Image (cartoon, rainbow, N blue to C red):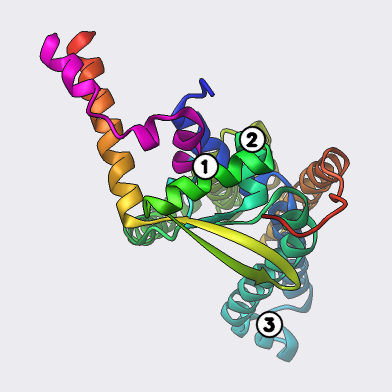
């Protein structure tokens, strides 16, 4: 009972990541995104299928977000809530607005950085390096800091290393970007899979499912 | 110091009780949580948790709803606006006391 109230609040926020389901679904989405970029590079932008693929990126992203949310909810309803309980998190309107403003600023910074890198270093594939920095920032700022979980720092570091390593690989843009998303997806799948395995082991299904 | 001590005795005793403070703090950081989650997080027995929740519900600090998530029956608890206000006030009172006595 002598728990620090802030620790209690952080532990409640951390509960969302306790089962690794989010990382599993996110990892799967990253692998699909990797396949998308590699396929686009393979087919070329001049081919009909390549053109369709390029045009449908926004639709695929929106559809992917929708499907992944449904999948996360379905898996949590089946695996997590019967074991350790149901929690609905608050949607902070001010926080959401702040994140949107941050995303717009980030988009401008990224565009500027990409152009600057491309002009300064001809041998350097700036897009994959900047992507690595952005994914690392998202993992550290939005996941690791709020949850305090070490595995998100590791994933952030992996993103930075992969981004810079692939930027020097000399591969065409689409392949290096595809490889980046594919490998990050695999890292996320491994992290999520191990977390889920430990969670299921530590939290067997209670004999009675009704609570209260 | 005497005045500060007198103020400390004015804190909301319903929230001041450690188990109920824990319940209210958990509920303040989410939109809602079910009985099983609260039981695991607080470490209280079913009977104990039920008793504390009933007291909080009586004071209208917590709203309890029986619902379903898919096929799973749930007892969902939410902190009301009155509960949120009481917790904020309680934390402020304690903070003021700590600041003055530090």
Q: Residues within 10 Å of mark 1 (few under 14, many from 20)?
A: some
Question: What residue is disc 1 on?
Answer: B52
Question: What residue is disc 3 on?
Answer: A53
Answer left or right for A60 relative to A107.
Answer: right
Q: Which residues are magenta?
A: B1-25
Residues under numbered marks 2 and 1 in contact, where contact means CB atoms less than 8 Å apart: yes
Q: Residue at x 44, y 53 (%)?
A: B57
Q: Chain of mark 1?
A: B
Q: Residues within 10 Å of mark 2 (few under 14, many from 20)?
A: some
Secondary structure at numbered mark 3:
helix
Q: Residue at x 53, y 49 (%)?
A: A134
Q: Is residue A145 above or below residue A105?
A: above
Residue B89 in percent (x, y) is at 25, 38
Question: What residue is disc 2 on?
Answer: B44
Secondary structure at numbered mark 2:
loop
Measured in 3D between alpha carbons, the distance from the residue under mark 2 to the one under mark 1, in whole angstroms, is 10 Å
């Amino acid at each position: 009972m002598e728990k620090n109230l802030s620790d209690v609040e952080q532990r409640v926020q951390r509960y969302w990541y306790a089962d690794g389901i989010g990382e599993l679904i996110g990892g799967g989405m990253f692998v699909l995104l990797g396949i998308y970029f590699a396929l686009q590079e393979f087919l070329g932008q001049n081919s009909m299928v390549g053109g369709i693929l390029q045009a449908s990126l926004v639709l695929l992203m929106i559809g992917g977000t929708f499907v992944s949310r449904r999948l996360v909810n379905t898996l949590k309803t089946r695996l997590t809530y019967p074991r350790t309980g149901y929690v609905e998190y608050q949607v902070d309107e001010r926080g959401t607005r702040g994140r949107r403003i941050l995303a717009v600023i980030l988009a401008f910074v990224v565009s500027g950085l990409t152009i600057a890198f491309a002009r300064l270093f001809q041998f350097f594939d700036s897009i994959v390096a900047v992507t690595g920095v952005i994914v690392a920032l998202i993992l550290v700022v939005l996941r690791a800091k709020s949850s305090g979980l070490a595995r998100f720092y590791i994933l952030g570091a992996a993103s930075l290393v992969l981004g810079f390593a692939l930027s020097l690989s000399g591969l065409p843009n689409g392949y290096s970007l595809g490889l980046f998303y594919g490998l990050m997806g695999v890292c996320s799948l491994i992290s999520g899979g191990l977390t889920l395995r430990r969670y299921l082991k530590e939290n067997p299904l209670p004999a009675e499912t009704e609570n209260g | 110091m005497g005045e500060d001590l007198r103020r400390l005795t004015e804190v909301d005793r319903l929230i001041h009780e450690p188990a109920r403070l824990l319940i209210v703090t958990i509920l303040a950081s989410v939109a809602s949580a079910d009985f099983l989650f609260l039981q695991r997080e607080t470490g209280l027995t079913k009977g104990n948790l039920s008793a504390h929740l009933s007291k909080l519900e009586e004071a209208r600090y917590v709203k309890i709803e029986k619902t379903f998530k898919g096929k799973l029956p749930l007892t969902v608890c939410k902190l009301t606006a009155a509960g949120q206000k009481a917790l904020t006030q309680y934390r402020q009172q304690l903070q003021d006391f700590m600041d003055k006595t530090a």
